[in-house]
Amino acid sequence: MISIARLTDADIPEIAAAFAVLGWNKPASQYWAYLDEQAKNERLVLVACVDGVFAGYVTLLFVSHHGEFLAIGAPEIADFNVLPCYRNRGIGSALMDAIEEEARSVNSIVGIAVGLTADYGAAQRMYVKRGYIPTGAGLFADGIAPSYGEQVTVDDGLLLTFTKKLVDG
């Protein structure tokens, strides 16, 4: 059974341990910072568990760091991860449904940025299927829109931004 709840301090050791096993750079300090931002109403973090075991999370920034989202007052889905062993089981969709519902209380539009490498292929497809469309702002390299002809590093900081019009379900 999938359950979704707000991040608490009790969740942090299990989350950090799950990512450490995968070799991903997601230390406990990241989630302590998220918890602090959540307490300040800057970020919301929703955690998914399957039968009481951590499976994934998603966060929502109430004030985006991306200019095109900020300009329209759209919150931003800023960090979304489902552990590989829990993928393709509806957990990502459940998290996205829940976070979009929260975003709807802020604005009728929500933004998301996605990496451009193949590692993000499943996420890219998922967002398009969910109705996200490119903003048309072009790509961003570590938050900066490079100029035509400029060379950038292909890594997790190379992003394309999307928005979705949230409609009442």
Image (cartoon, rainbow, N blue to C red):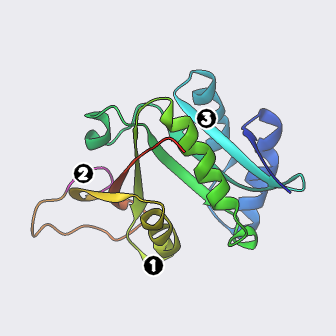
Name the N-terminal-most of marks 1 and 2.
1
Q: Residue furthest right?
A: 51
- Residue highlighted by disc 3: 33
- Regarding residue 29, the answer to whether it shows in the image is no
Pointer 3 local density, CA inside 10 Å: few below 14, some 14–19, many at least 20: few
Q: Secondary structure at mark 3?
A: helix
Q: Looking at the picture, how far across and down is residue 134, in whole percent? A: 29, 59
Above or below 140: residue 128 = below
- Residue highlighted by disc 1: 118
Above or below 162: residue 101 = above
Tell me which corner region of the image, top left, top right, bottom left or bottom right, holds residue 35: top right
Name the N-terminal-most of marks 3 and 2.
3
For the point 57% across and 21% down, the residue is 40
Q: Which residues are magenta?
A: 141-145
Above or below 95: residue 120 = below
For the point 63% across and 23% down, the residue is 39
80, 104: nearer the viewer? 104
Pointer 1 local density, CA inside 10 Å: few below 14, some 14–19, many at least 20: few
Q: For the C terminus, which image quadrant?
A: top right
Above or below 4: residue 39 = above
- Residue highlighted by disc 2: 144
Name the amino acid type tagged 2. Answer: Ile
